[in-house]
Image: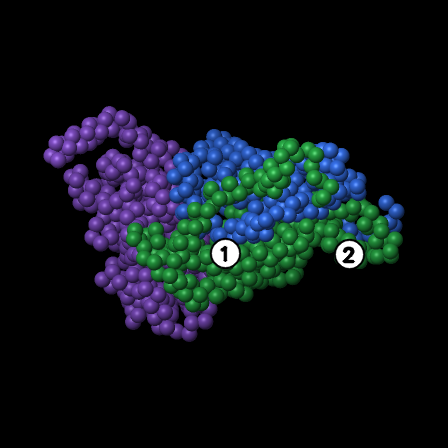
Chain colours: A purple, B green, C blue
């Protein structure tokens, strides 16, 4: 018996050694290559190959279908070795055992994870590492505000509403815009909950839904409803996506927009003469504490079916190393995921630099990251919010009750 | 049939000949059947099987739960809403396709204009055919935007000056989505009917006009009966396809606002890929399959009578 | 023809034709105009008809990208193979359905429709597992076979419909004269059914050309992917390349348009009437 074991072990070792000799090719499935300036990701991958001999094959996918792709890949064992992830999906893929436990891999490789700005955990173990983060401050069309006679940037909700009202009264534009399309319900996270989080509120307590009798959340819902009721919001919200929302801003039809910094370049291209700046999200009247800023991230994980777990982790470490991570952040108009990365934003847009300052004064938050069926939770919230705004649901309390009931079922 | 006892069919042994004769239709069908069985039998079986288990795919060891998933689906108010919307969407789309497809093909089949003129219009009418679903969805999303060209045309012509949010208003959304689908799908009917019209013998019309039938009578007594086999095929296919029209609805409204445009296809997608409840998605699919099988039987009966 | 045409028929008919053309053609015209605009102008109010900043840039960016050109080549290759195979197989099957009565006919017919009633999205995962098991993942063969499953049921149904409109005397005459079944089908029925075959062929082409879900999931590398996937790659996380998407679909539709123009002659009224009279 022992003999066989030894033979088997030696065999395994030989196999392992032979695979070291052979060139390993890692597949890296992501939607980033098309988002980044041409050649950036390829360049980083090639440098990695030059250093380690491990080849990287980039597989690009349309962002909207990444989820479908990963789900199908996970079920059929064809997932790429390294996958780009959104925090909204991590929980489900971890539970399906489609993605690997990175804590274990990091420990095995002796990686110091203290340098990571964040790790997305499920049941205490890391499954996704945010590579770069996209903050969502508020962008303001300065000329529209001038035209409306607003001289000071709003800091509180009531000031914001007054400014929005002035814009609607004195210009052809609307105050604010929110994309609530059911097909991509991320507007709930990025444009709705951002109000709550900026005012120090939370939608979870101890990782569980805490929507009922949540005073700040109740006020947030009422605030957003009042913006709708008073016609301060650009029409078409219920079928709007982030991609169409930004076109409203580019065309000067809204004064304020809560949006990802990734949009800055696009706005510059589309409207070179648009005079806009970034401000912190206005907070609930009377709130004095620190603000939470929504971050969405490009996360990275390893497929459970990958034969090259170790090499895959090596590649992630490379992407997360301060210098590479900084370069990636610069190229993506994002903030780095490594705390020691020092991106050089001197060439960056002034609006971006301002936002970085705002970001440094706040804390990053996104309570939807790592929740079970996150997207589904947002969708439920979205549907009920619309029903309340439209008057089908009579009170905030019953709206939040109904959402809570459905959310709890998903947990 | 009796005349056809083929001199051509080889084999002197009468028994062999009989076998050969009986197997002829199956030989013609063989490539189709082999392909379908090899590629579809297993996946369809899997889908039906999933529908009787709890949480498949996610769960490595799913448990047999019998009809539990079907009960869940049938008692879900959103499913009821999806069925209602789907019936509207499919019903109006199919009728719209038929009416527009038929009208356009008759217009194009006229004898008043020369082949050049008709050729130009034929190409224009077939245009919506040439674009993929995602692009059609994007295009209409642009046009139906509150600041889109449709509202612009309405305001310029003085029909309506308010900027209607076609896809965001619960009272318009389903209608708007259905309209898009009619626009995108009628060329299939038009071209198929146009091809069918070529096969109708001119004698039939002449005989009818000698009998004093006017244009409408000719249409109902000659054209429609002659096209019947094609029309039945078209309607059946369109019905089945429209149920699963996905891209168009998903990209423009995602089933919203609230559930205004939620159809079976968006409902199934959300179950499967947003909630990861493949079992529920499969059970919904099972119900649709059942409903469509009944329609298929009806179709097959019709075809049988036709022979 | 000896039917008299009243004086008002022509103008009325022309008005109807133009109205119909507006309905079908206007959205396409709008797509065409927008494909030359800079992205920001696509959502401008009031809308611009012909942009002052119109440029070929969206088209250039498609043609200059070898990856995008490859999408087109893949689409043509896959769609063409699918059309040829679909036509051959469906003509055979339709002949069986149209000219024979046999045991199981109703059942097979029912089956062919019913299998289409399984929503593709639910089939996705088990079907993909099968393709992976057959070692066809990320190949043209996988796409071709998959599209055959989409196109065959339709093609068979429509071909059966067309063949049923053709009188039986037509092919029976051949066999009475001593011709074989093969000759009756390919020598007489098929040539007579050309308008139907062209219609089926064109539609098959469009279905294969426009399919997205399986084109995306059954392939993994961009060198195997088709135009609809390429278009979707322009729908980014934060922003869409509206003009490039439109330019890509305009380019994609051109060859189909040419094909349609070429096959026009098969739709000319009465072309087959002579042979059908029998």
**Which residue is farthest left?**
A2
Tag 1 subunit: B
Quadrant, the N terminus of chain B: top right
Tell me if I can see residue B74 in this picture: yes
Q: Does C129 appear above or below A389?
A: above
Marks 2 & 1 on one chain: yes
A405 on left or right of C211: left
Assign a secondary structure to mark 1.
Answer: helix
Viewer-side residue, C218 vs B250: C218
User: In the rendering, at what x and y percent does residue A195 appear?
Assistant: 34, 61
Q: Which residue is mark 2?
A: B221
Q: Which mark is residue B289?
A: 1
Residue drawn at the location 71% of the way across and 47% of the way down: C165
- Establish if A214 lies above or below C122: below
Q: Earlier in the sequence, mark 2 or mark 1?
A: 2
Residue A297 left/right relative to C231: left
Q: Position of residue C262 (x, y in %)?
A: 68, 35
Residue C29 - label: none
């Amino acid at each position: 018996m022992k003999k066989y074991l030894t033979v088997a072990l030696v065999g395994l070792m030989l196999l392992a050694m032979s695979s070291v000799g052979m060139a390993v090719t890692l597949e890296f499935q992501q939607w980033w290559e098309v988002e980044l300036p041409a050649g950036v990701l390829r360049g980083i991958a090639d440098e990695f190959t030059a250093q380690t001999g491990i080849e990287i094959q980039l597989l690009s996918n349309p962002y909207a279908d990444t989820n479908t792709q990963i789900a199908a890949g996970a079920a059929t064992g064809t997932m790429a070795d390294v996958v780009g992830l959104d925090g909204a999906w991590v929980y489900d893929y971890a539970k399906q055992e489609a993605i690997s436990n990175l804590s274990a891999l990091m420990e095995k490789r002796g990686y110091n994870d203290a340098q990571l700005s964040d790790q997305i955990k499920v049941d205490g173990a890391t499954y996704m590492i945010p590579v770069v983060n996209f903050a969502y401050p508020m962008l303001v069309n300065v000329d529209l505000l001038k035209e409306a006679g607003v001289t000071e940037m709003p800091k509180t909700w009531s000031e914001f509403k007054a400014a929005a009202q002035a814009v609607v009264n004195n210009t052809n534009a609307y105050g604010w815009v929110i994309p609530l399309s059911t097909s991509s319900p991320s507007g709930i996270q990025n444009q709705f909950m951002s109000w709550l989080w900026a005012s120090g509120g939370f939608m979870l307590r101890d990782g569980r839904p805490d929507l009922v009798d949540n005073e700040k959340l109740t006020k947030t819902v009422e605030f957003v409803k009042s913006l709708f009721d008073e016609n301060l919001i650009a029409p078409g919200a219920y079928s709007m996506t982030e991609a169409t929302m930004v076109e409203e801003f580019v065309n000067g039809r809204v004064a304020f927009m809560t949006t990802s910094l990734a949009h800055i370049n696009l706005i510059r291209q589309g409207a070179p003469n648009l005079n806009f700046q970034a401000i912190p999200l206005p907070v609930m009247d009377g709130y004095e504490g620190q603000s939470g800023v929504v971050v969405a991230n490009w996360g990275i994980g390893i497929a459970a079916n990958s034969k090259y777990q170790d090499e895959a982790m090596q590649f992630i470490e490379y992407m997360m190393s301060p210098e590479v991570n900084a370069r990636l952040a610069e190229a993506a108009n994002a903030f780095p995921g490594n705390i020691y990365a020092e991106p050089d934003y001197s060439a960056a847009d002034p609006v971006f630099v301002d936002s970085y300052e705002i970001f440094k004064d706040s804390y990053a938050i996104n309570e939807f990251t790592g929740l079970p069926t996150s997207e589904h939770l947002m969708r439920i919230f979205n549907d009920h919010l619309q029903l309340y705004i439209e008057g089908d649901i009579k009170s905030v309390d019953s709206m939040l009750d109904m959402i809570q009931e459905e959310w709890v079922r998903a947990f | 049939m009796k005349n056809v006892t083929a001199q051509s069919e080889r084999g002197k042994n009468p028994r062999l000949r009989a076998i050969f004769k009986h197997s002829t239709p199956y030989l013609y069908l063989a490539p189709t059947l082999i392909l379908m069985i090899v590629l579809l039998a297993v996946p369809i079986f899997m889908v039906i099987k999933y529908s009787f288990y709890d949480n498949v795919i996610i769960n490595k060891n799913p448990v047999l739960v019998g009809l539990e998933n079907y009960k869940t689906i049938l008692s879900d108010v959103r499913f009821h809403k999806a069925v209602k919307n789907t019936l509207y969407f499919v019903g109006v789309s199919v009728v719209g396709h038929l009416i527009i497809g038929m009208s356009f093909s008759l217009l194009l089949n006229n004898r008043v204009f020369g082949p050049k003129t008709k050729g130009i219009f034929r190409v224009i009418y077939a245009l919506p055919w040439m674009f993929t679903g995602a692009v059609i969805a994007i295009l209409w999303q642009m046009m139906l935007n509150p600041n889109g060209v449709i509202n612009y045309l309405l305001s310029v012509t003085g029909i309506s000056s308010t900027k209607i949010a076609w896809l965001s208003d619960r009272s318009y959304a389903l209608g708007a989505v259905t309209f898009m689908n009619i626009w995108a799908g009628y060329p299939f009917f038009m071209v198929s009917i146009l091809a069918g019209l070529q096969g109708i013998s001119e004698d039939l019309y002449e005989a009818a006009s000698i009998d004093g039938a006017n244009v409408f009578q000719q249409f109902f007594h000659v054209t429609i009966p002659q096209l019947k086999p094609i029309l039945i095929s078209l309607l059946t296919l369109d019905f089945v396809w429209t149920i699963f029209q996905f891209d168009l609805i998903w990209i423009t409204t995602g089933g919203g606002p609230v559930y205004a445009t939620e159809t079976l296809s968006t409902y199934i997608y959300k179950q499967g890929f947003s909630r990861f409840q493949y079992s529920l998605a499969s059970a919904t699919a099972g119900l649709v399959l059942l409903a469509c099988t009944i329609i298929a039987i009806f179709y097959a009966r019709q075809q049988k009578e036709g022979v | 023809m000896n039917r008299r045409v009243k004086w008002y028929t022509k103008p009325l008919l022309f008005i109807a034709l133009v109205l119909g053309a507006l309905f079908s053609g206007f959205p396409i015209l709008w797509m065409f105009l927008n494909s030359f605009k800079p992205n920001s102008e696509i959502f401008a109010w009031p809308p611009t008809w012909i942009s002052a900043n119109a440029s070929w840039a969206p088209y250039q960016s498609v043609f200059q990208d070898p990856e995008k050109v490859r999408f087109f080549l893949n689409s043509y290759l896959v769609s063409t193979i699918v059309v040829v195979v679909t036509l051959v197989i469906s003509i055979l099957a339709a002949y069986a359905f149209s000219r024979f009565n046999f045991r199981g006919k109703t059942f097979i017919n029912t089956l062919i429709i019913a299998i289409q009633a399984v929503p593709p999205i639910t089939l996705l995962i088990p079907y993909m597992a099968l393709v992976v098991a057959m070692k066809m993942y990320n190949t043209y063969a996988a796409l071709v076979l998959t599209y055959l499953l989409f196109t065959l049921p339709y093609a068979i149904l429509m071909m059966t419909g067309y063949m049923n409109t053709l009188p039986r005397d037509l092919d029976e005459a051949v066999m009475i004269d001593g011709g074989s079944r093969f000759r009756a089908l390919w020598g007489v029925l098929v040539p007579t059914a050309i308008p139907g075959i062209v219609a089926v062929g064109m539609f098959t082409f469009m279905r294969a050309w426009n399919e997205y879900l399986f084109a995306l999931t059954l392939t993994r590398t961009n060198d195997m992917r088709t135009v609809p996937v390429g278009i979707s790659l322009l729908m980014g996380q934060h922003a869409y390349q509206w003009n490039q998407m439109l330019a890509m679909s305009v380019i994609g539709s051109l060859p189909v348009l040419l094909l349609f123009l070429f096959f026009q002659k098969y739709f000319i009224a009465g072309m087959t009437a002579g042979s059908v009279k029998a």
